[in-house]
Amino acid sequence: MATVALLSNPTSTGNRAFLPRIREYCARHSDIFHYEVEAVEQIDDALASIARVRPRVLIINGGDGTVQAALTALHRGRQLGDNPPPIAVLPNGKTNLIAQDLGWRGDPVEALDRIVAMADGGVEPHVVRRELIALSEDGAPPVLGMFMGGAGLADAMLYCRNHLYPLGLPNGLSHVLATLASFFTVLTGMTARFLPQVPESIRVSLGGGRHEGRFSVLIVTTLEQMLVGTRADTSARGLKLMAVDRSALAVLRALFAGVTGRAGKQHFTGVHIDHGDRISIESDASDVILDGEIFHAARGRPITLSSTAPMPFLRLAA
């Protein structure tokens, strides 16, 4: 039985710099079972091999897309059974939303060392259970993740990916520039090839409620952190939704609500916060991004999101 199993994706952005150090660390610790995949299609086989060593903790070393692929494979194949070990996520990739929400920040090798120490000392005090988002479209098998961005947020993410990352700018600076460019389009209504595109109208249905319009931000998540200081209601089960109307005042109200801790506790015009077990998203033509993977919502072909049974994760701050 291995203390921990480490699943690494060498092609993730962060691993280009950190993987040699991670390999060196694993070479010094015989109780780490390290499996590297060259493509997401190999994750099923990797998890089957990991199941044989029965680790106390499964660590995923890659960006949010790698985490999403691993969670989807675990849910479909159940290689680690109905009671899998807690999952830890090394801070890696360009956004690290899942790792950050679980408290893992900074140097991946230092985080790996902390996880190994937790596994040696007993992980129970650090385990939290999180539901996942199961995204379905066109009858295809569901894909699992923890953070979905749509509307203007998805357009900003794609703008950052397609226009700013290729410039070789630091990730943080790219994110700031994408945010400023998106807010500029909201403030001025200007459109241009060098700016994020204007989002299409979207219809979001959940339970007995419905939100429809052009949104600067559309988020569905099971993470605690939603947007700039805005934390989801952890007492609410299921999927947490936040939609911000496409207007400068609505965006400013959302930021104010987030930094003051009033989001979800006080009503702000143009800021919609809701939750439910099942959410449908439909549009004439609009993209949504689930943990780095792009999906397309179209008229008559809605994207459906539903919550799953909770899975165990390892949280630094628990």
Image: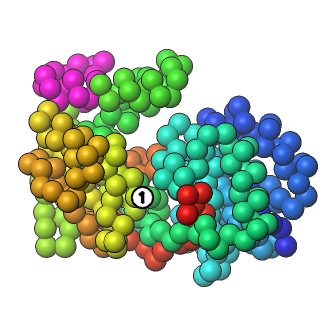
Residue 301 in sight here: no
The image shows residue 132, relative to residue 219, as above or below, that is: below
Quadrant housing residue 87: bottom right
Quarter of the figure with the N terminus: bottom right
**Residue at image coords 52%, 44%:** 96
Whole-percent x and y of residue 49? 78, 67
User: Looking at numbered disc 1 in the image, what kind of residue is underneath it?
Assistant: Leu
Scheme by which the image is coloured:
rainbow
Tell me if mark 1 has few (under 14), some (14-19) or many (20+) residues whose alpha carbon lies within 10 angstroms of its own: many
Whole-percent x and y of residue 133? 41, 64
Left or right of 76 in this view: 172:
left
Magenta region, residue range: 181-197
Between residue 117 and residue 20, name the one nearer to us.
117
Left or right of 34 in this view: 65:
left
**Residue at image coords 36%, 23%:** 177
Between residue 45 and residue 167, name the one nearer to us.
167
Whole-percent x and y of residue 189? 13, 25
Which residue is most to the bottom? 82
Whole-percent x and y of residue 165? 48, 25
Residue picked out by circle 1: 223
The image shows residue 100, relative to residue 216, as above or below, that is: below
**Residue at image coords 70%, 33%:** 16
Which residue is most to the front? 260
Which residue is most to the left? 269
**Residue at image coords 70%, 66%:** 57
Quadrant housing residue 132: bottom left
